[in-house]
Image (spheres, rainbow, N blue to C red):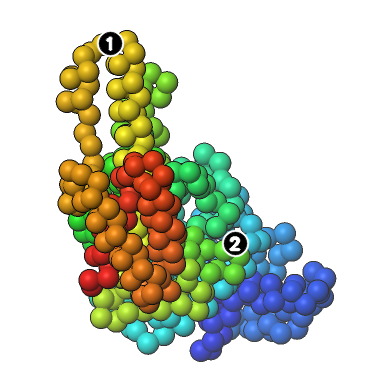
């Protein structure tokens, strides 16, 4: 194990080795420095195991982590856990993992410093663990939280290893946090979707249940329809559960994503099914500095980022996107119907009356029957646009400036051609509602 007691101090020999490395010291100088500092303590049996209080001996190694080992052969659960942990990290992890662990532990200890939790290295758990976490927070109630930092692109073998970890944590009722390296993000911009590995998916089971966002998705779907929530009309939400996924960069700054699983809306011959690892990003990702990553909320007994609420700005942005998307879909549908109508006219199939009855027109609020009424409505629209342009809403939500310009273009189109765009009514209604709040 990398840590032992020396009187009342925890001595992490590997961490001290890393600090010396960062100064540019050679291995020989590092070894001489640590020997000068601790060798006599080791010879006198003054180092003690944090797990069982037995005597430990310092082991300085160039090609693997410096550590302490039990003097006698009857080692404890902590020693056996460390052997398993060291084997796994040697095979799967990197220098980035070692440096990141040091940052994470420092921030974790700081974040939980005013609680009754004790933060220890995972291998110091007093039970044998077949798969060992990087860190553990132990609570007086017996509750255990685990923390794992996952770096780099991993092969199938490593994914299975992480899945086994997750299964073990679940069987022991641990509350677990997986911090995935930011380089592992697989993002598809057109669909605003993330593809998750098996281990990333497995981590969601520990962070499920973001109820404010799930409630918002249900409300938006009820008002606008499921199709308005998803950028690509070939896709839909498999359900409206919202999960949290946390990535960190090299400085251990966090990036929190809210996601919901995707599936194909309609099965095709070319693509019979969509792989179930695709999730759509809900709203905007949230940046969390490493100083704030483990800020503890005593009221909810969780980290503050786990209590992510829906803000007015986020709601307004989502509604604006949905309204614009619906307007675009409506225009596409109108053009499609016009194409069908023209085709029917030229082929004389079906009759003109049948085509007319199947074609749905979307008109402005007053449903005017003559040009005079339409002009009155257009004047009303212009008044709303002027009021919106002069309101504070344009500054707080710059997207409205784009909508105003598009409405002015649609009004000019009407004056030139007599045609009224479907989106004009949608945008005016959205602005009218916003002004009345």
Q: Quadrant of residue 346?
A: top left
Q: Quadrant of residue 210?
A: bottom left
Ranked by sequence position, the earlier of labels 1 and 2 is 2
**Of helix, strand and loop, which one carries label 2?**
helix
Q: Position of residue 167 (x, y in %)?
A: 35, 49
Q: Which residue is mark 2?
A: 97
- Residue at 30% across, 16% down: 345
- 221 vs 197, left or right, is left
Q: Mark 1 or 2, which is nearer the eye?
A: 1
Q: Position of residue 323 (x, y in %)?
A: 32, 52
Contact, mark 1 vs mark 2 (Cβ under 8 Å): no
Assign the C terminus to one quadrant of the image.
bottom left
What is the distance, in whole Å, between disc 1 and disc 2 at their CAs?
Answer: 71 Å
Q: Position of residue 57 (x, y in %)?
A: 61, 73
- Residue at 23% across, 13% down: 350
Q: Residues within 10 Å of mark 1 (few under 14, many from 20)?
A: few
The relative height of residue 299 versus residue 324 in the rendered view (above or below) is below
- 351 vs 417, left or right, is left
Residue 95 showing in the rendered view: yes
- Residue at 53% across, 69% down: 253
- 305 vs 255, left or right, is left
The relative height of residue 103 versus residue 128 in the rendered view (above or below) is below
Q: Which residue is mark 1?
A: 348
- Foreground pick, 105 / 125: 105
């Amino acid at each position: 194990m990398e840590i032992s007691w020396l009187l009342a101090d925890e001595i992490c020999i590997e961490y001290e080795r890393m600090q010396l490395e960062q100064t540019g010291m050679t291995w020989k100088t590092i070894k001489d420095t640590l020997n000068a500092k601790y060798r006599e303590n080791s010879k006198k049996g003054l180092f003690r195991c944090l797990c069982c209080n037995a005597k430990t001996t310092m082991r300085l190694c160039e090609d693997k982590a410096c550590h302490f080992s039990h003097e006698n052969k009857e080692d404890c659960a902590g020693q056996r856990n460390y052997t398993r942990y060291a084997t796994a990290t040697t095979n799967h992890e990197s220098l980035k993992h070692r440096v990141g662990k040091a940052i994470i532990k420092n921030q974790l200890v700081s974040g939980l410093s005013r609680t009754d939790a004790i933060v220890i290295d995972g291998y110091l758990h007093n039970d044998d663990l077949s798969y060992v976490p990087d860190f553990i927070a132990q609570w007086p109630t017996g509750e255990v939280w685990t923390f794992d930092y996952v770096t780099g692109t991993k092969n199938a073998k490593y994914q299975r290893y992480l899945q086994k970890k997750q299964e073990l944590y679940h069987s022991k009722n641990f509350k677990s946090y997986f911090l995935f390296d930011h380089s592992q993000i697989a993002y598809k911009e057109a669909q605003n979707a993330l593809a998750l590995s098996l281990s990333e998916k497995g981590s969601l089971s520990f962070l499920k249940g973001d109820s404010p966002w799930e409630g918002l998705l249900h409300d938006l779907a009820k008002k606008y329809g499921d199709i308005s929530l998803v950028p690509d009309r070939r896709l839909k939400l498999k359900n409206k559960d919202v999960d949290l996924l946390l990535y960190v960069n090299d400085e251990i700054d966090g990036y929190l994503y809210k996601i919901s699983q995707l599936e194909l809306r309609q099965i095709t011959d070319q693509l019979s099914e969509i792989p179930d690892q695709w999730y759509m990003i809900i709203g905007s990702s949230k940046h969390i500095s490493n100083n704030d990553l483990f800020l503890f909320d005593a009221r909810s007994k969780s980290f503050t980022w786990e209590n992510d609420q829906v803000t007015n700005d986020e709601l307004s942005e989502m509604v604006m996107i949905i309204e614009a998307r619906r307007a675009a879909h409506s225009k596409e549908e109108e053009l499609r119907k016009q194409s069908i109508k023209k085709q029917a006219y030229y082929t004389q199939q079906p009759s003109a009356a049948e085509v007319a009855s199947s074609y749905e027109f979307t008109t402005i609020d007053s449903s005017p029957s003559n040009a005079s009424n339409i002009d009155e409505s257009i004047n009303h629209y212009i008044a709303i646009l002027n009021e919106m342009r002069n309101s504070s809403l344009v500054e707080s939500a710059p997207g409205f400036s784009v909508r105003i310009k598009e409405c002015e273009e649609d009004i000019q189109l009407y004056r030139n051609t007599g045609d009224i765009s479907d989106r004009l009514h949608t945008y005016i209604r959205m602005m009218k509602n916003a002004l009345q709040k």
